[in-house]
Amino acid sequence: MCDAQGVSVAAWIRRSRLERCRRDLVDPLLRSRPIHAIAWKWGLTDPAHFSRSFRVVAYGMSPRDYRRLATEPVHG
């Protein structure tokens, strides 16, 4: 499945876990849940590695910054 698309199974799993974390980070019902607890829930147990992967591999910013920007009220 993944190899035919040029993506390793490990990379696909990592990307899927990061995406699940991203969704939880912006979920208003999970706003009070600590970031490390969200990462842990999806199998990312090393907070530093999670933060680095989230920033470098997936979203270009830290999980904290992503959550803050995604949940700030829009003024206009």
Image (cartoon, helix red, strand yellow):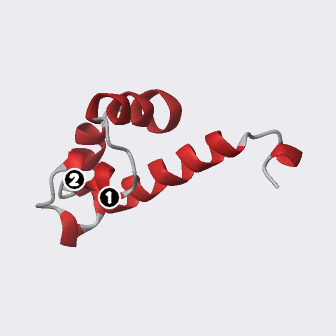
- Dot 1: within a 10 Å radius of its alpha carbon, few (fewer than 14), some, or many (20 or more) residues? some
The C terminus appears in which quarter of the rendering?
A: bottom left
Q: Which mark identifies residue 37?
A: 2
Amino acid type shown at disc 2: Ala
Residue 49 vs residue 27: left or right? right
Mark 2: secondary structure? helix
Asked whether 74 or 43 is in front, the reply is 43
Give me the residue at 41% from left, 37% from top: 54
In the rendered view, does 54 fall on the left or right side of 62? right
Quadrant of residue 9 within the rendered picture: top right
Q: Is residue 29 left or right of residue 51?
A: left
Residue to which mark 1 is pinned: 41
Residue 22, percent across and down? Answer: 39, 53
The answer to whether one can see residue 60 in this image is no
Q: Which residue shows up at 32% across the image and 42% down it?
A: 45
Measure the alpha-carbon separation of dots 2 and 1: 6 Å
- Looking at the picture, which amino acid does disc 1 mark? Lys
Residue at 22% across / 56% down in the picture? 71
Q: Which numbered disc covers residue 16?
A: none
- Tag 2–tag 1 contact (CB < 8 Å): yes
Residue at image location 82% in from the left, 39% down from the top: 6
Q: Is residue 49 above or below residue 2?
A: above
Q: Residue furthest bottom?
A: 29
In the rendered image, the quadrant that contains the N terminus is bottom right
Nearest the viewer among 19 and 36 is 36
| Residue 27 seen by the camera | yes
Residue 70 spot, x, y in % from top left: 29, 52
